[in-house]
Image (tube, rainbow, N blue to C red):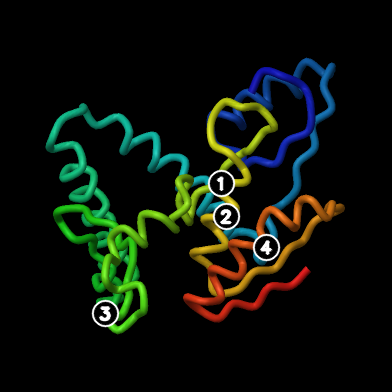
């Protein structure tokens, strides 16, 4: 921490020692508050997520990197099992070869003749669990393309926008009708 401003981050031992130096100089206003029990899990899990990300990224690149990362993750799960005395937690051990579930469709689905192509067509390029920033530039991913993929991959659509033009709605009208033919969807504005 080197810049003045407002923050919302957990105070670590390192940050605490820096803050003590600032407070001794008496030229800084420092405010903190106790971590609320209702917010603790959220702040602590975000903090640990960042720490784990840094640690897992430090593994040397190579074919074994993913396997080593999975092994460490599973060791942490085993440690949590022993610490919490909860055998059920080991049901969450990660499959050793490292795979992500990308789709699960019945072969009776109308698009079953080529499910792989269908899933590829409707899966957003940004993924389903990651956040992405879209700008108005021509560089990177197109907001329109990603929204169309999101519509095709959704069960329900809710729009929460501060304003919208009719031209913005028309862009997605065809995709909505195509999507409804494949699967019922609730489309609300």
Earlier sequence position, callout 1 versus callout 3? 3
For the residues labelled 2 and 1, the Cα–Cα distance comes to 5 Å
Mark 4 touches mark 3? (CB < 8 Å)? no
Decide: is 63 above or below 112.
Answer: above
Q: Residue at coordinates 45% horizontally, 46% vertically from top-left?
A: 125
Earlier sequence position, callout 4 versus callout 3? 3
For the residues labelled 4 and 3, the Cα–Cα distance comes to 28 Å
Q: State the image quarter where residue 77 is shown.
A: bottom left
Decide: is 99 above or below 16.
Answer: below
Earlier sequence position, callout 4 versus callout 1? 1
Q: Secondary structure at mark 1?
A: helix
Q: Residue at label 3?
A: 107
Q: Residue at label 4?
A: 173
Seen in the image, is 93 located left or right of residue 122? Answer: left
Q: Secondary structure at mark 2?
A: helix
Q: Position of residue 116 (x, y in %)?
A: 28, 60
Q: Residue at label 1?
A: 145
For the residues labelled 4 and 1, the Cα–Cα distance comes to 13 Å
For the residues labelled 3 and 2, the Cα–Cα distance comes to 24 Å
Q: Residue at label 2?
A: 148
Q: Position of residue 118 (x, y in %)?
A: 36, 62
For the residues labelled 1 and 3, the Cα–Cα distance comes to 27 Å
Residue most toward the bottom?
Answer: 108
Q: Secondary structure at mark 3?
A: loop
Mark 2 touches mark 1? (CB < 8 Å)? yes
Q: Residue at coordinates 36% horizontally, 54% vertically from top-left?
A: 120
For the residues labelled 4 and 2, the Cα–Cα distance comes to 10 Å
Q: State the image quarter where residue 6 is shown.
A: top right
């Amino acid at each position: 921490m080197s810049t003045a401003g407002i923050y919302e981050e957990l105070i670590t031992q390192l940050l605490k020692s820096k803050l003590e130096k600032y407070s001794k100089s008496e030229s800084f206003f420092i405010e903190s508050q106790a971590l609320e029990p209702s917010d603790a899990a959220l702040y602590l899990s975000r903090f640990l997520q960042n720490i784990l990300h840094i640690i897992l990224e430090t593994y040397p690149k190579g074919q074994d990197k993913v396997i080593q990362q999975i092994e460490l993750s599973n060791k942490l799960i085993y440690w949590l099992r022993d610490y919490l005395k909860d055998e059920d937690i080991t049901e969450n051990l990660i499959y050793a070869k490292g795979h992500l579930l990308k789709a699960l469709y019945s072969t009776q689905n109308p698009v079953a003749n080529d499910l792989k192509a269908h899933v590829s067509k409707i899966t957003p390029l940004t993924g389903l669990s990651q956040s992405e920033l879209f700008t108005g530039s021509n560089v990177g991913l197109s907001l329109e393309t990603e929204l169309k993929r999101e519509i095709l991959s959704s069960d329900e659509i809710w729009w929460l926008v501060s304003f919208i033009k009719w031209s913005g709605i028309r862009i997605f009208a065809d995709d909505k009708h195509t999507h409804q033919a494949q699967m019922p969807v609730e489309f609300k504005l």
